[in-house]
Every structure is written in structure tokens, then in C-alpha cells.
């Protein structure tokens, strides 16, 4: 939950950074019940959009590749712009080194594919608990 102009907004804003169109659509389908979803396949657009209008949660594909940029580059750029950004990485590769790297760089979590709606909902709940502790 976020607070805007003194009013509580019930659902978070969510940004999905994914270069595979079908995966992006599937994620948007899962996540739209949890908040307002924006999708981008362009890392510059993701960072610029976040800087102008920060979203509450950012889900970033690790294996995302665009002009020599990967998901870790996007994560670092977002956290450079806002060290409190709530970013979660996801990947089809559950390599422990990737998971460790994501944590070391400041990701709030890591989801391995196959995609499970419950995994993404877990991080939305984690975000909500961070903002409004029980």
C-alpha cells in the first residue's frame, strides 16, 4: 500500500521488466488483481519511468537482454536512482550464484520459473507488510 496526498491506496503499482512478450502478458494477468500493472521491454524506459513516477514494486527478469544490458544492470540503475526501491528478480535459472548476486545488489527477493502466481503474491504481501506493518 502506498499513501498519496494523505489517502491510502489499496493496491500497489507494479512494473514488470520482461523482454519475452508471452511471459510479460502472463505476469500482467497474474498481477493485475494485486495492483496497477505496467510492462516494459526497454531497460531505459523502465528506469526513466521509475524516476518520473516510481512504482511500488518492480519485477525484473534476470536473463533480460537489451543492448548489452541484463536484469542486474536494471536493478543497479533502479537502486542507484532510489535505494529504497522494492525490486524482485525472477529467472528460469535457479542458479544459487544468481540468487546471491541479486541479494548482494539489493533485490528484495528472487523468484525462479516456472512462474507461480503465489510466488509473486508473496512479494506483494511482503511489500504491503513493509509499508504497513501489522
Image (tube, rainbow, N blue to C red):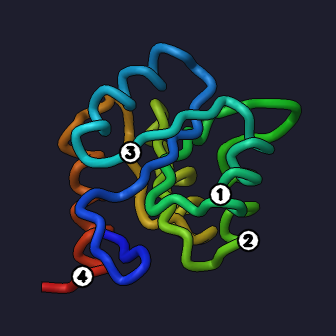
Q: Nearer the viewer, mark 2 or mark 1?
A: 1
Task: Return the mark for residue 106.
Answer: none
Q: Nearer the viewer, residue 66 or 15?
A: 15
Asked whether the beta carbons under mark 3 and mark 1 sit within 8 Å of each other, the answer is no
Q: Nearer the viewer, mark 2 or mark 3?
A: 3
Q: Which is more N-terminal, label 1 or label 3? A: 3
Q: Nearer the viewer, residue 130 or 10?
A: 10
Can you tell which quarter of the image residue 28 is in?
A: top left
Asked whether the beta carbons under mark 4 and mark 1 sit within 8 Å of each other, the answer is no
SS class of the residue under badge 4? loop
Task: Return the mark for residue 81.
Answer: 2
Give the Cα distance between marks 2 and 1. 9 Å
Q: Which is more N-terminal, label 3 or label 2? A: 3
- Count of numbered circles on the image: 4
Q: Residues within 10 Å of mark 2 (few under 14, many from 20)?
A: some
Task: Return the mark for residue 132.
Answer: 4
Q: Which residue is mark 1?
A: 50
Residue 7 position within the rendered picture, expressed as x and y whole percent measured from the top left: 31, 76
Q: Which is more N-terminal, label 1 or label 4? A: 1
Q: Which is more N-terminal, label 4 or label 2? A: 2
Asked whether the beta carbons under mark 2 and mark 4 sit within 8 Å of each other, the answer is no
Q: Which residue is mark 3?
A: 36
Asked whether the beta carbons under mark 2 and mark 1 sit within 8 Å of each other, the answer is yes
* Quadrant position of the N terminus in the picture: bottom left
Give the Cα distance between marks 3 and 1. 14 Å
Relative to 24, residue 7 above or below? below
Q: Which is more N-terminal, label 1 or label 2? A: 1
Q: Is residue 11 left or right of residue 82?
A: left
Amino acid at each position: 500500500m502506498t499513501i498519496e496526498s494523505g489517502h491510502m491506496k489499496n493496491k500497489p503499482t507494479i512494473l514488470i521488466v520482461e523482454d519475452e512478450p508471452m511471459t510479460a502478458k502472463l505476469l500482467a494477468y497474474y498481477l493485475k488483481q494485486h495492483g496497477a500493472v505496467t510492462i516494459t521491454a526497454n531497460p531505459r524506459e523502465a528506469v526513466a519511468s521509475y524516476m518520473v513516477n516510481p512504482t511500488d514494486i518492480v519485477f525484473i527478469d534476470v536473463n533480460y537482454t537489451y543492448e548489452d544490458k541484463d536484469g542486474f544492470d536494471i536493478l543497479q540503475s533502479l537502486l542507484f536512482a532510489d535505494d529504497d526501491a522494492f525490486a524482485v528478480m525472477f529467472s528460469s535459472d535457479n542458479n544459487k550464484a544468481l540468487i546471491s548476486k541479486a541479494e548482494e545488489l539489493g533485490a528484495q527477493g528472487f523468484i525462479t520459473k516456472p512462474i507461480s502466481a503465489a510466488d509473486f503474491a508473496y512479494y506483494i504481501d511482503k511489500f504491503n507488510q513493509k509499508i504497513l506493518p501489522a
